[in-house]
Image (cartoon, helix red, strand yellow):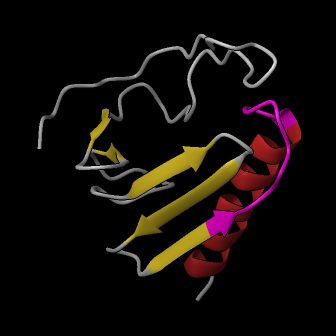
Amino acid sequence: MILTDIRQAIAPFKPHLANALPELYPEPHDIPQGWGLTFFLHLKDSAVHSEGTGWWAGLPNLFWYADRKRGIGGMIASQIIPFGDMKILGLWANIEAGLNENLQTK
């Protein structure tokens, strides 16, 4: 695993299919992000994800993640384009926050 932060903006090739995003997963900038074999990786433990959490997204605002250390994962499946829909991104963030909050109270 390479411990280099690969965080970068997304400039869509076809703006009618994807929104420009300054970064897709805005974890704190002291949390490095990288690539696994076929997915995005969080390279350090944070309040939101464990080290090694993998996730990926698809064009119609499909998102999944798997945090094996915490034993949780989630998926949002929509058919909304353009990619990077702010309501779907907000939903994803709220679902993860709710899961994490529930884990902390038990």
Up/down of 82 relative to 68, above or below: above
* Residue visible at 56% across and 60% down in the picture: 64
Image x and y of residue 12, in percent: 63, 14
Residue at position x 15%, y 34% in the image: 3
Our reading of the magenta stretch's main secondary structure is loop
Q: Is residue 23 left or right of residue 2?
A: right
Query: Where does residue 89 sit, x and y in percent of width and height?
Result: 75, 42
Q: Residue at x 85, y 44 (%)?
A: 80
- Residue 25 falls in image quadrant: top right
From the image, which quarter does the C terminus lie in? bottom right
Q: In which quarter of the image is residue 31?
A: top left
Q: Going by the picture, which residue comes out furthest to the left?
A: 1
Q: Residue at left 31%, top 32%?
A: 32
- What's drawn in magenta, residue-wise? 75-86
Residue 77 colored magenta? yes
Image location of residue 58, percent across then percent down: 60, 45
The answer to whether 69 is drawn above or below residue 30 in the figure is below
Residue 53 versus residue 20 in the image, above or below: below
Foreground residue, 90 or 80?
A: 80
Left or right, 89 with reference to 31: right
Where is residue 42 drawn, in percent x and y?
A: 34, 46
